[in-house]
Amino acid sequence: MEMFSVMMMVFLIGAAIAVSAIRSLLGAIIVFMVYSLVMAVLWQQLNAPDLAITEAAVGAGITTLLFVFTLKTIRGIGK
């Protein structure tokens, strides 16, 4: 189980760097969503189910929706 956690943490570091480096805003949003889902899995591995559920709902769910709607609105204004 420890090896899985280490691999997920390495993935999180890569995802954090990727969010900063990706030129596409939609791509950055998708990587951020994946980052939040992996964090939820890690919280579950650390026996913190309340934090896992909150991370999945807020980090991957609501925040991603707000980012996508904001991106859609910004692109709609520019036309």
Image (cartoon, grey):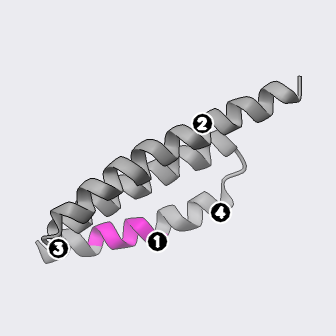
* Residue 24 badge: none
Q: Residue at x 79, y 30 (%)?
A: 75
Answer whether residue 4 is magenta in the image.
no
Q: What range is drawn magenta here?
A: 7-13
Q: CA distance from mark 2 to mark 4?
A: 17 Å
Q: Residue at x 10, y 71 (%)?
A: 1
Tag in front: 2 or 1: 2
Q: Residue at x 65, y 63 (%)?
A: 20
Looking at the picture, does residue 61 appear above or below residue 13?
Answer: above
**Which of disc 3 and disc 4 is earlier in sequence?**
4
Mark 2 residue element: helix
Residue 35 horizontal side relative to residue 47, left or right: right
The image position of residue 21, as x and y in percent, is: 67, 60
Disc 1 marks a residue whose amino acid type is Ile
Asked whether the beta carbons under mark 1 and mark 3 sit within 8 Å of each other, the answer is: no
* Magenta: main secondary structure: helix
**Which of disc 4 and disc 2 is earlier in sequence?**
4
Residue 74 horizontal side relative to residue 19, left or right: right
